[in-house]
Amino acid sequence: MCLICDRIEQIKAGTNPYFVAELKTGYVVLGDNQHFFGYTLFLYKRHEGKTELFDLEPEERAKFMEEMVLVAQATSRAFGAEKMNYELLGMGDAHLHWHLYPRRTGDIENYGNNGKGPVWWYPMEKMYADDNRPTSAELKEMKSRLRAELAELGMPEAE
């Protein structure tokens, strides 16, 4: 089973502390590490051979994209982003999922272009350092803020 599928199973079991909301096509979760404050992921619900956007039926793809955009908007509003960065990669985990990074000037310190470079310019060992993990109280507050923005945008949890 892939890492994303493992995380989804934790959501279904009620044991994923980073879970925020379930939407029609995916799950909203906060990233384990928060160097980029508000870093959020949108995990596609299914895996079965659906590893590319073009693998999805047009209606499903449109809904997945629409929901991702609204999750990005909610993330931006909840965490005060100056700019959002979007990634849909998949060589590490071939399960459709979006990385949504709220960005602010200087958030990558002095790593190129006055702190305005892409997230991959920031050293991975710093980005994923344990001191970037939110406390339980911080995580609770972050989830509350993001849920409130999702609700404001009309994104109720899936049925």
Image (cartoon, rainbow, N blue to C red):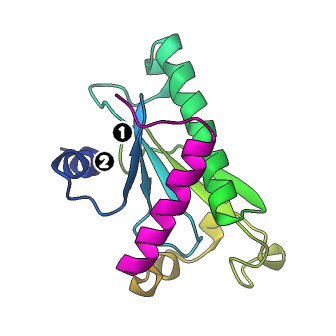
Question: Badge 2 is on which residue?
Answer: 4
**Residue 124, position as x, y percentages in the image:** 50, 74
Choose top left, top right, bottom left or bottom right for residue 138: bottom left
Question: Badge 1 is on which residue?
Answer: 95
Tell me the SS state at disc 2.
helix
Toward the right, the furthest residue is 114
**Residue 155, position as x, y percentages in the image:** 53, 36
Give the residue type at disc 1: His
**Residue 15, position as x, y percentages in the image:** 20, 58
**Residue 86, position as x, y percentages in the image:** 62, 48
Q: Report the number of discs.
A: 2
Give the residue type at disc 2: Ile
- The overriding secondary structure of the stretch rendered in magenta is helix
Left or right: residue 154 versus residue 8 is right
Viewer-closest of 21 and 111: 21
Compared with residue 154, is residue 143 higher up or lower down, i.e. above or below? below
Q: CA distance from mark 1 to mark 2?
A: 7 Å
Residues at marks 1 and 2 touching, judged by CB atoms closer than 8 Å: yes
* Dot 2 alpha-carbon crowd within 10 angstroms: few under 14, some 14 to 19, many 20 or more: some
Left or right: residue 121 versus residue 14 is right
Residues in magenta, as a range:
134-159
Viewer-closest of 7 and 126: 7
Q: Residue at x 61, y 59 (%)?
A: 101
Compared with residue 95, is residue 121 higher up or lower down, i.e. above or below? below
